[in-house]
Amino acid sequence: KFEHPRSGSLGFSPRKRCRRGQGRVKSFPKDDQSKPPHLTAFIGYKAGCTHILRDVDKPGSKLHKKETCEAVTIIEAPPMVVVGVVGYIKTPRGLRTLNTVWAEHLSDELKRRFYKNFGKSKKKAFTKYAKKYSDGKKQIEAELEQLKKHCSVIRVLSHTQVKKLSFGQKKAHLMEIQINGGSVAQKVDFAYNLFEKQVTVDAVFQVNEMIDTIAITRGHGTQGVVQRWGVTRLPRKTHRGLRKVACIGAWHPARVKWTVARAGQQGFHHRTEINKKIYKVGKKGEASHSASTEFDVTKKDITPMGGFPHYGIVKEDFLMIKGAVPGVKKRAITLRRSLVPQTSRNALEEIKLKFVDTASKFGHGRFQTSEEKAKTYGRVKA
């Protein structure tokens, strides 16, 4: 009667607001030098959710050769721009940065990241650094040689092109993306050749691949113990409220232990979720950007009627990922390659979409396209 499993995991303590508004990759996939150099992460922006129909190919399962309806998240991922390379050396205390080499030309949306008030500033960031390129790049080449000689881990600095999106943000998100594959010299050359160039999302991820999402969850402010820790409500007749913890500890030790559920911040936490399957990669200006399939040949774009609520229209490249992704709409989602080789049946299954829903997500959407709606309604009074 007096024993039961505790409510809420302590593994996520302390439940505090995240200091950064952006997911941080704490570990990259293991390096395999036999493969050619490639990038291992990307940043996209959450647009919203819809659902799809597909046939399940899973011999032995009750769903085998049957149709299933699944929720998917659309993540808009315009090309990222590589603007630098960082070299790390291994020390007994972990990795240490040896040097950072930046590109010659940096865009304003990236420079905004280095200022509190860009409008009032003199915008002098990197003006002196760019002079390193004027003397025949001797100093830059010397620094790159230093990275090739001493470093063991090479990462590129790349930023998103947030101006290409339909919401009002002007400040780009910057992150380090590790280069895996090839020798250190090949990695540095690969990074240097990417300077000031755009990297598309399909150069990092493929369809049917399992990836991890790293993001900040939706914030709920201060919440009580029932919502935050899932403790049981007290009986109806309880004096002074019933959504509480009845006993917060013994008389001695005369302090409240950290394991006791208390009210406080819920949400806006940094979370990594693993094994999200990519169902579709949409390229801007190509047939893959539409929501048409072999079974549903209606000409329709991936954006639902009336746009994604609180987001708008998806114009750039996008990923369609099975299930939910942490965070609110417009939030930057860090996408990372899986840390482990995937062998499960779910990971190896080939996905063939039969139908992608584009009905309005604002209310009970009845129509897939505005043409279909016009056909049903006929001419309406102006």
Image (spheres, helix red, strand yellow):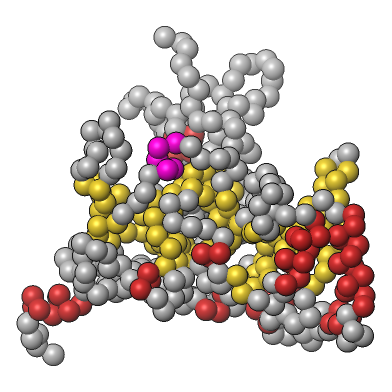
Indicate left or right for 146 with 340 as reference. Answer: right
Work out whether residue 83 or residue 21 is closer to the camera in this orientation and state it: 83
189 and 160: which one is in front?
A: 189
Residue 293 in the image: state x and y as whole percent: 27, 64
Magenta highlight range: 344-348
- The quadrant the N terminus occupies is top left
- Left or right of 125: which side holds 6? left
Q: Residue 253 vs residue 211: left or right?
A: right
Q: From where the camera sits, is residue 295 visible? A: yes
| Residue at 62% over, 36% down | 13
Q: Quadrant of the C terminus?
A: bottom left
Quadrant assignment, res 359:
bottom left
Taking the magenta stretch, the answer to whether it contains residue 217 is: no
**Magenta span includes 345:** yes
Which residue occupies 51% across, 49% down? 211
Q: Nearer the viewer, residue 138 or 364?
A: 138
Q: Is residue 307 visible?
A: no
The residue lying at 69 percent from left, 81 percent from top is: 107
Q: Residue at x 64, y 29 (%)?
A: 258
Depicted 214 relative to depicted 77: above or below? above
